[in-house]
Amino acid sequence: MNWTSETIETLKTLWQAGHSASAIAGKLGGLSRNAVIGKAHRLGLAARPSPIKHRPVIRVERLSGRGCVWPLGDPGDADFHYCGAKAEPSRPYCAPHCAIAYRRRDRDAA
């Protein structure tokens, strides 16, 4: 497909409205997402932030007490939390999670 003044104006309008490059390519027809991005770059259209959502950084240092810090769930979900059960001495996890996290050499040697 050749870029006409009409398709360029449509690209500019959709780009400014926040449509994704894939959506713009679909509306213009016969173009790839990369063709739209390349043309937008050559036209000097303002770059936009990535649509990929960044997950919050959850730092273990913020946890207080001696609770188990085994993560439960997806860090991006609202209900994400740490186990919180009593941690084993000198370990960050409770007994059941230590059994998952640490393997005994004599048992694995067989």
Image (cartoon, rainbow, N blue to C red):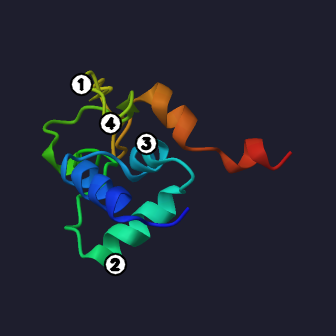
Amino acid at the residue labelled 4: Pro
Quarter residue 102 falls in: top right
- Characterize the local packing of mark 1: few (<14), some (14-19) or many (20 or more) Cα atoms within 10 angstroms: few
Amino acid at the residue labelled 2: Arg
Q: Earlier in the sequence, mark 4 or mark 2?
A: 2
Label at residue 42: 2
Which one is nearer the viewer's eye here, 86 or 33?
33
Residue of label 3: 27
Image location (x, y in percent) of residue 24:
39, 48
Above-or-below relation of 2 to 30: below
Image location (x, y in percent) of residue 41:
33, 74
Residue beneath the point at 22% across and 49% down: 59
Residue beneath the point at 49% across and 56% down: 33
Residue beneath the point at 39% across and 70% down: 39
CA distance for labels 3 and 1: 35 Å
Label at residue 78: 1
Residue of label 4: 75
